Image (cartoon, helix red, strand yellow):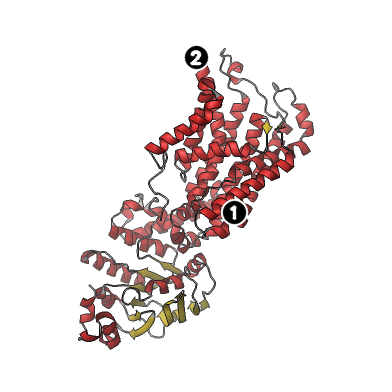
Amino acid sequence: MAGFEFLLQQLVTGIANGMLITLIAIGYTLVYGIIEMINFAHGDVFMLGAFSALTFLQLVGAQAVRRVRNVDQAPSPETYLWLVLAMILAMVFCAALNVMIERFAYRRLRRGGRMAPLISAIGVSFMLQNVGLYWKGASPVNFPRFIPQIDLVKEIGIDSFVRFTTKDLFVIVVTVPLVIALTVFIQRTKLGKAMRATAQDRDAAQLMGIDINRTIALTFLLGGALAGAAGLVSGLYNNTANFQMGFSYGLNSFTAAVLGGIGNLNGAMLGGVFIGVLAALSDGYIDPRWTPVVIFGTLNLVLILRPTGILGQESAERA
Amino acid sequence: MTAQGAGVVLDVTGLTKQFGGLTAVDAVDFRVQERQICSLIGPNGAGKTTFFNMVAGQYEPTSGDVIFDGRSLRGLRPHQITARGIGRTFQNIRLFTNETLLENVLVGMHSRLRSSPVAALLRLPSQRREEAEAHARAMDLLKLVRLDRFADESAGNLPYGMQRRLEMARALASQPKLLLLDEPTAGMNPQETLAMTTLIRKVRDDFGVAVLLIEHDMQVVMDLSERVTVLNYGQKIAEGTPREVQRNDQVIEAYLGRRHKRPEDEVAGAHA
């Protein structure tokens, strides 16, 4: 049964990673849905989210870090407090950053065709990467091991090679409620309705009394907040961060958003988990070096068969 | 007919819009009284929709002023103008086709709802009350346009005539004082047209709104409007009661050309 257990193990890893990808993919898909623009700087916002959380933890959590040096031990209650604070900080930081990026780098270009904001986004991406480079240096930095790595499968008395650790659980416990909260926000609230209306027909939306500039800013705010949360979770899960992580995670997340159907929230979730699992399976059964080939090959295949992505509708967002 | 001495809802003075060298709307003066139904007519390209777009704030006028409810609308963005009380429908229907009928009407209420996102997420009692009220009001509006049965359908699935009625309900949701209808009966069969005419009159009577419509169907225009304004090449060439306008030589000329001066009723048949 080792073969089956190996499969399960890859699935566990894939789902945890896929949830992280989902959090970032939502930022791409929300922005695309509302202004048909690919925000290439989004991955780098995620990276700065990880950096801001790390800086915060280094500043205030030094003692807490020492206390949980033993990774098999449950962390102290204060640690959780620091973590919650770090998460709020990263979310607020990235939300504000994303709103500022939209305000200063994209808004003026909104009427300048598709190319102008896209190029601007690539420029912002370079700027943010260099901020990251300046902030934490060129080599990967260690992220403190706040989250213990206790194998829950063993804890409950099952003897298996499959490990489902507290870290995997942590990723799911943080990401799932965020995704649910976002969905409820978009489905149920007045501002969520305004976002959907703006995505479908911007002119008609403003004539319904919707301030589209504010609604678009709100979209960047939500995407940024999720990217910030993803930054912290990624740091705690992988225990490392570097200034280029935004590019690799961003590329996978963007692929997930396109695969699921860009502009479609459920598509981003489906695509995120799909890419996470696909990458884990490819890592395990083929070779990690071939994983990008597998991912982008699959993307090509899906787009050939379904150009709008798995859940994308034909020109659903067009006026 | 409107009550004598009713207030002026919309007072447009010298409104002009130039696109490069083209003057689409040229120094138009225009008034709408409270609870009045007015029509804006004219041949294709006369500047009617451009005029609408300036009143609703989508185009910035080159010069002139729009006074609505006693205050100038200059410099306001479209959503602010909606909040002041102007609702509109579009020549080519622009519903949120992925949303249900109910959601479409609720979006129309955007400027009238105030609950904060926090209240919405926590489902505070105030928020729930507002939501229930909005829901009930939206259903009333759907009932008014006889679409309440389809409240949970996707707007995109509706046939054309119903989509026009839904647009009307959505425009009413913002509680406007003035309703701008851009060709409300375009593409409708005679039966649907009649239903729409009845609906427009009912809306005016029940909600006390003023209605300004662009319309090509002269039967509708003559039937419905208390005042008619005729634009041609961006200029106002005539104004008055339907009867007066029908007799106006310039109007007949604009529609029929110079050699076809004919008695009054021909205007109606000419554009069909």
Confirm whether residue A154 shows in the render.
yes
Q: Taking A196 as reference, is A164 left or right?
A: right
Q: Residues within 10 Å of mark 1 (few under 14, many from 20)?
A: many
The disc numbered 1 marks a residue on which chain? A
Could you tell me residue B93's position as x and y percent?
Answer: 35, 61
Q: Nearer the viewer, residue A5 or B19?
A: B19
Residue at 57% in and 12% down: A159
Q: Earlier in the sequence, mark 2 or mark 1?
A: 2
Confirm whether residue B248 shows in the render.
no
Image quadrant in which the C terminus of chain A is located: bottom left
Could you tell me residue A72's position as x and y percent?
Answer: 69, 21
Quarter location, residue B104: bottom left
What residue sits right under mark 1 in the picture?
A102
Could you tell me residue A126's position as x and y percent?
Answer: 64, 46
Q: Is residue B188 above or below residue A169?
A: below
Q: Identify the amino acid type marked 1.
A: Glu
The disc numbered 2 marks a residue on which chain? A
Residue at 52% in and 53% down: A115
Do callouts 2 and 1 point to residues on the same chain? yes
Tag 1 secondary structure: helix
What residue sits right under mark 2 in the picture?
A3
Q: CA distance from mark 2 to mark 1?
A: 48 Å
Q: Identify the amino acid type marked 2.
A: Gly
